Image (spheres, rainbow, N blue to C red):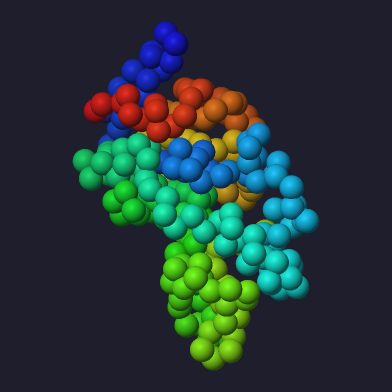
Amino acid sequence: MEDLEKNIEKLQELLRKAKRAVFFGGAGVSTESGIPDFRSQDGLYHQKYKFPPETILSHTFFMRHTDEFYEFYREKMLCLDALPNAAHKRLAQWEKEGKIAAVITQNIDGLHQKAGSQNVLELHGSIWRNRCMRCGKQYSAESIAESSGVPHCSCGGIIKPDVVLYEEPLDDAVVERSIRAIREADLLIVGGTSLNVYPAASLIDFFHGDNTVVINRGTPAKEMGGVLFIDGKIGEVFSRVHI
């Protein structure tokens, strides 16, 4: 507990000195809002389905078994009532105060925007955007949640969530903006991610500043040197930081 207090004090001091901090976050940022992650003991990979989640959330499965994809997607991915937690709120506050230059997230839940963050780079897209694969017409997340079976556009085309499925590339423009933000940062805070998911996890290699802070439950998979590591829930840690 004493080490935790000291590390939080160090984070606090780094944030006070920072002029352009960037936050890079994963599923652990949203678990405190009740959104399940994939790899924890209670995550989606440890629940029993006809197919593993990684298979269901792939481009091939979406194209071949669209009805089963949407059955899983509505039940497990469309968390429309989830609310921002302390981590989301603190990041939005720090951005408003000029400390956080960008939030780069692997999450698709839109909670950073709900909390008030403006410069949010969504590496894996968002459940809040949905497009017809034929004509490009946009649909709300609510319309997808309220539909049944495979949702179709008024033109007859299949509607697809604007989320990056396995086998699909990341959006080049979002990646470029993320790399630029990380390169220009003087402090990189990595939170709520085990850094298992590539190519997203490789983006932090573009950071050339002096200070990196990692906040996560358990040591990340990616080896990193010279890092201030805080083992804990990110919302609880951020709640104790005052700058």
Q: Quadrant of the C terminus?
A: top left
Q: Residue furthest bottom?
A: 155
Viewer-nearest residue: 226 or 152? 152
| Residue at x 62%, y 50% (from the top left corner) | 199
Name the residue at 48% across, 25% down. Answer: 232
Point 63% across, 37% down: residue: 42
Judged left or right of residue 81, residue 202 is: right
**Which percent across, then down, holds residue 230?**
47, 23
Looking at the figure, which quarter contains the N terminus? top left
- Where 105 sits versus 236, above or below? below
Q: Which residue is depicted at the point 51% across and 89% down?
A: 154
Which one is nearer the viewer's eye here, 9 or 86?
86
* Residue 47 placement, left or right of 163: right
The outermost residue toward the top is 2
Q: Nearer the viewer, residue 55 or 19?
A: 55
**Which x, y percent locates residue 194?**
59, 36
**Residue 87 visible in this rendered orientation of the protein:** yes
Expressed as whole percent of the image width and height from the top left, the position of residue 146 reads 49, 71
